[in-house]
Image (spheres, grey):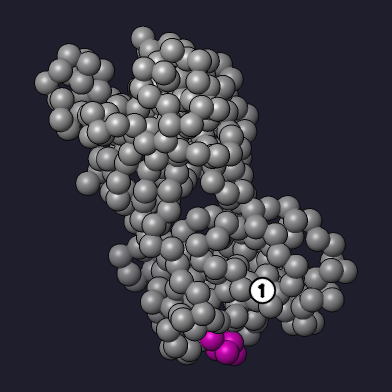
Amino acid sequence: MKRYGMLFLTVISLSACAQSHPTSNKDTVISASMPVGDSALMSKPSTYWREHLSEEEYRILREKGTEAPFSGKWLMHKDTGYYTCAACGNALFRSDRKFDSECGWPSFDEEITGGRIKTQMDYSHGMSRLEILCGLCGGHLGHLFDDGPTSTGKRYCVNSVSLNFVKSNAFAVAETDTLTLGGGCFWCLEAIFESLKGVVSVESGYAGGTIANPTYKEVCTGSTGHAEVVQIVFDPHQTSIDELFQVYFTMHDPTTLNKQGADEGTQYRSIILYKNEAQKQAAVSLINDLNTSKLFADPIVTTVEPLKAFYKADVSHQDYYENNSKQAYCRLVIQPKLEELEALFAKRLK
């Protein structure tokens, strides 16, 4: 995988993750911990939006208009809470990421993670700008600039008309999220993901099969249908599913069927087990992008399946590298992977 590392990071950074949670009217407030963004609202006809939006909302959100500077109701707004899409209720920005940019429009230096906002190039009016759109309904929000005064260096310049506001006690952003991945021996994946910033914990276990509470020996026979997986608990304020997928697809070979290095069998297959539609769409979209880019010589064989159950492995398989770093497998297999991780993702390590 080392030969693909930097090129892969370039390809994945250009990928757009379409995520899913349908809604039917703009009064629905979607929790910031809920999945967003599929074609259910993206494909709605103009007649639908004309019925649900005011004339000015339609002009800006659906026709990519712009409100007059210093005219928006949220420009000087200071309350604590969340700014949501005026068309569908998708939670977009926390109020503590808002700042006065003196540009005439509400400005934010960071979005709520999880694919809630998507971007595309905008060449209108003889300019080249990065347009920001609601990841759920595709509504036009404004533009993103790299001239922000805070540590993020970003300025999300947003039309007030594109936004609604919900006070903080109306819903809360999830403190943590989970992602379940398989790609060879779980000892390797566990050591890799435990090294990343934003990862709270990693547990090794089994998923994807039909037998409840399998043992390690049973899984090793390949007869249970389970794969060795890791369940990653992470802080969405510090990292994202997109970033975790970057590491995942870089640090294992997703093109070898039921095989990673010397480990062979269905228990070592490359698998993403999603807990909701958002994770599914993010995974499918990325795999499609990687296959289209032909970054890998062979097609990706990673399967994307619903997580029905996760069975934690016994204590001897938890924190395996940390507890057994001098063993031959750890020195010869896991340590080189950690060295590659450091070379490619140094800024993301704890």
Say if 202 sits above or below 322 in the image.
Answer: below
The spot of residue 257 in percent (x, y) is 52, 15
Is residue 258 in sight in this rendering? no
Q: Which residues are magenta?
A: 69-74
Answer with left or right where residue 262 lies relative to residue 303.
left
Residue extending farthest to the front is 212
Residue 327 location (% of width, % of height)? 15, 18
Q: Which residue is mark 1?
A: 28
- Magenta stretch containing residue 70, yes or no? yes
The count of marks equals: 1
Residue found 58% across the figure and 33% down from its top:
304
Q: Quadrant of the N terminus?
A: top left
Between 57 and 155, the one nearer to me in the picture: 57
Q: As drawn, which residue projects farthest toward the right?
A: 47
The local crowd at label 1, few if under 14, some if 14 to 19, many if 20 or more residues have their Cα within 10 Å, is few
| Picture residue at 69% right of the left edge, 78% below the top | 27
Residue 344 picture quarter: top left
Instruction: Give the amino acid at mark 1.
Output: Thr
| Rendering coords of residue 258 (x, y %) | 49, 15
Can you say whether 189 is above or below 134 in the image? above
Q: Secondary structure at mark 1?
A: loop
Q: Is residue 71 magenta?
A: yes
> Can you see residue 217?
yes
Determine the residue positioned at 34% across, 71% down.
149
The x, y position of residue 308, in whole percent, is 55, 39
The structure residue drawn at horizontal position 42% and vertical position 20%, both measured from the top left corner, is 219
